[in-house]
């Protein structure tokens, strides 16, 4: 039954996107032919953007590796430590998904222009550190359910902010008016592939760590690793937000 519900929702989403989402390919071609006064970037700007994009690729890969792996072990934590039923696990995951959607559709959409993608990403990573710490405390806490839901709330915030913010940062490094017409798509595709690689390897590694050392040490390692990723983001990603107007100028 759950599979049929998922299939129905997917079909509704596909039809909605087909009807409501406009095609922008022809619009981009027309815009490129019209905007002839836009100057290409100089060599130093291009090199800086390529270096930033490489840093974003690595950050995306390591973040996805840690986050997806630790998220995958939530079911083990709720069953092994808290003895949750399938209904309780479903409620927990539904709660996480709803909070994540509200964060992404509400907080991120309204504040990303105000704070910038980099700040949104850092906020999400800090919440991820807090969330993993809460999950580490769940195993031995007096009120484990409260710690669990606090940690899941933090991870829901992370889920709704970091990936969309990193994707936005990667997109801003791609100049639309110079180079091959498909260069931006290739760059973003490579960026996404780092994330998919992390998501494929993360669960295996995290589950191995969980069952060998236990949930406390597993989530503690996740929290410390995420702290290192946060520092890499702070130090390796430019603080200045690139606006749409700046993508057409040389600095």
Image (cartoon, rainbow, N blue to C red):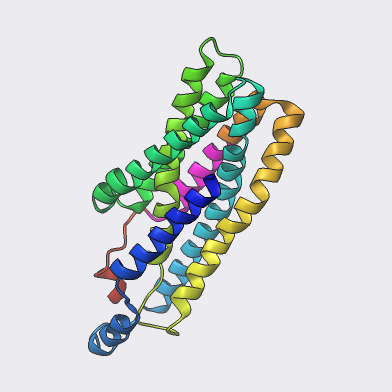
Give the x, y percent position of residue 246. Answer: 27, 69
Q: Is residue 86 above or below residue 172?
A: above
11 relative to 33 in the view: left or right: right
- For the N terminus, the quadrant is top right
Say which residue appears at 70% left-offset and 37% top-offset: 207
Give the x, y percent position of residue 114. Answer: 23, 49
Does 234 appear in magenta? yes
What kind of secondary structure does the magenta stretch mostly adopt?
helix
Image quadrant of residue 19?
Answer: bottom left
Image quadrant of residue 69?
Answer: top right
Give the x, y percent position of residue 169. Answer: 40, 59
Q: Please state the total of marks drawn on the protein image.
A: 0
Say which residue appears at 37% left-offset and 51% top-offset: 118
Say which residue appears at 23% left-offset and 88% top-offset: 34
Say which residue appears at 56% left-offset and 33% top-offset: 223
- For the C terminus, the quadrant is bottom left
Boundaries of the magenta span: 224-238
Question: What is the residue that sits farthest to the top in this orientation?
Answer: 142
């Amino acid at each position: 039954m759950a599979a049929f519900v998922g299939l129905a929702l997917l079909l509704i989403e596909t039809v909605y996107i087909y009807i409501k989402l406009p095609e922008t390919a022809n619009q981009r071609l027309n815009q490129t032919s019209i905007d002839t006064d836009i100057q290409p970037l100089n060599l130093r700007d291009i090199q800086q953007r390529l270096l930033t994009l490489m840093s974003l690729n690595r950050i995306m890969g390591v973040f996805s590796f840690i986050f997806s792996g630790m998220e995958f072990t939530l079911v083990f934590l709720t069953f092994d430590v808290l003895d949750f039923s399938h209904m309780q696990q479903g409620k927990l995951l539904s709660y996480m998904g709803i909070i994540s959607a509200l964060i992404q559709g509400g907080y991120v959409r309204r504040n990303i222009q105000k704070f910038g993608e980099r700040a949104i990403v850092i906020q999400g990573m800090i919440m991820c550190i807090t969330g993993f710490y809460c999950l580490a405390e769940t195993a031995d806490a007096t009120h484990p359910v409260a710690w669990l839901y606090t940690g899941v709330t933090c991870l829901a915030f992370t889920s709704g902010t970091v990936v969309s913010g990193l994707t936005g940062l990667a997109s801003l490094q791609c100049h639309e008016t110079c180079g091959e017409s498909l260069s931006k798509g290739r760059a973003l595709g490579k960026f996404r592939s780092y994330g998919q690689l992390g998501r494929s390897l993360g669960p295996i590694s995290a589950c191995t760590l969980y069952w060998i050392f236990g949930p406390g040490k597993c989530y503690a390692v996740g929290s410390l690793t995420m702290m290192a990723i946060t520092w890499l983001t702070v130090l390796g990603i430019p603080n200045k937000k690139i606006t749409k107007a700046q993508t057409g100028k040389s600095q």
